[in-house]
Image: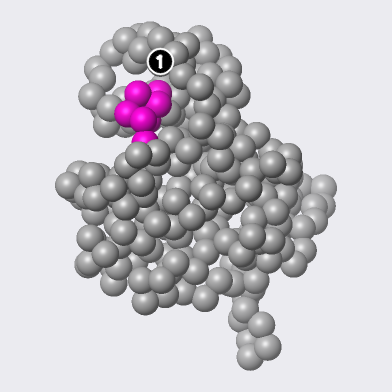
Amino acid sequence: MFSIENRNYSIFLKVTPKGQMQSEAQMTDYLSKHGVCPNVLIYTSDESRDYLITNRIMGTDAASDEYLAQPSRLTDVFANCLSSFHRIEYVGCSRVNGLSEMIIRAEGNYKEGKAEKGILRYLGYTSVDAAYKDMVCLYGNVCEDKVIVHGDYCLPNMIVHDFENRGLIDVGYSGVGDRHYDIFWGLWSLEYNLKSDKYADRFIQAYGGQNVDQERLRLCGLLSVFNGYRGQDFYE
């Protein structure tokens, strides 16, 4: 990503291999209309690359040292941001990243021997087969709690100014899905960035504990084992 600034404008240019940024451009544009993402100025492609230009959200990513230094306050902002995001109307959103899509990818990746060992350990598993068995069992007993999910909800993707949420970036994995997927990755990000698991309960309470189902949360963690690191095709 490149930042381009002068006295008249401040923009970001993101470049990826061709065909990799269509979803991000579409969802950034959709979510910008709800005031939570930067505006898409240009999205285009050439023979080998995709190019996305957006305006800049003024602020700093929430994983910056100045915010990590006040973890309780940061946790509240992080949870409230996600709760507000999940209240966006999902009817009319054409992209889907739900449990049924994830379970299909997970089954295929399991058969290919792909599993993200870091998430496996985070969930307390030592056996890939046991994790897969539990995932299938949990999936058979849940109904999806549909919202628009961010798909890569982590502190670096929340832009804040003076502990005020200013917007979200990197929504290429966004779409209609289950809220617990974002909640899982929000909890993971807090532990990873703050080097502590003691803010998990605070996050859930600030988000709205009545909306959090522990079995569905665990399912989304297990789906992440077989869907790759933060939804991306990357495995330890």
Q: Nearer the viewer, residue 92 or 61?
A: 92
Q: Position of residue 128 (x, y in %)?
A: 34, 14
Residue at 30% from the left image edge and 68% from the top image edge? 67
What residue lies at 61% left-to-right and 37% top-to-bottom? 176
Q: Is residue 215 magenta?
A: yes
- Image height check: is 224 above or below 130? below
- Measured as percent of width and height from the top left, residue 187 is found at 32, 43
Q: Is residue 200 left or right of residue 64?
A: left
Q: Identify the element where label 1 is drawn.
A: helix
Whole-percent x and y of residue 42? Answer: 77, 63
Compared with 93, 170 (above or below) is: below
Q: Nearer the viewer, residue 45 or 129?
A: 129
Q: Residue at x 44, y 13 (%)?
A: 141
Disc 1 target residue: 138
Taking depth in this image into account, of 167 and 209 the one nearest to the observer is 209
Quadrant in the picture for the C terminus? top left
Q: Quadrant of the N terminus?
A: bottom right
Position of residue 148 measured from the top left corner of the image (x, y, whole percent)? 58, 43
Relative horizontal placement of residue 5, taking residue 125 as reference (left or right): right
Instruction: Inspect this view and state whether residue 132 appears.
Output: no
Question: Which of the 4 image quadrants contains residue 165?
Answer: bottom left
**Does the magenta run of residues contain 29?**
no
Left or right of 99 on screen, residue 214: left
The amino acid type, in three-letter code, at marker 1 is Leu
Q: Which residues are magenta?
A: 212-219
Asked if residue 208 can be seen in this view, the reply is yes
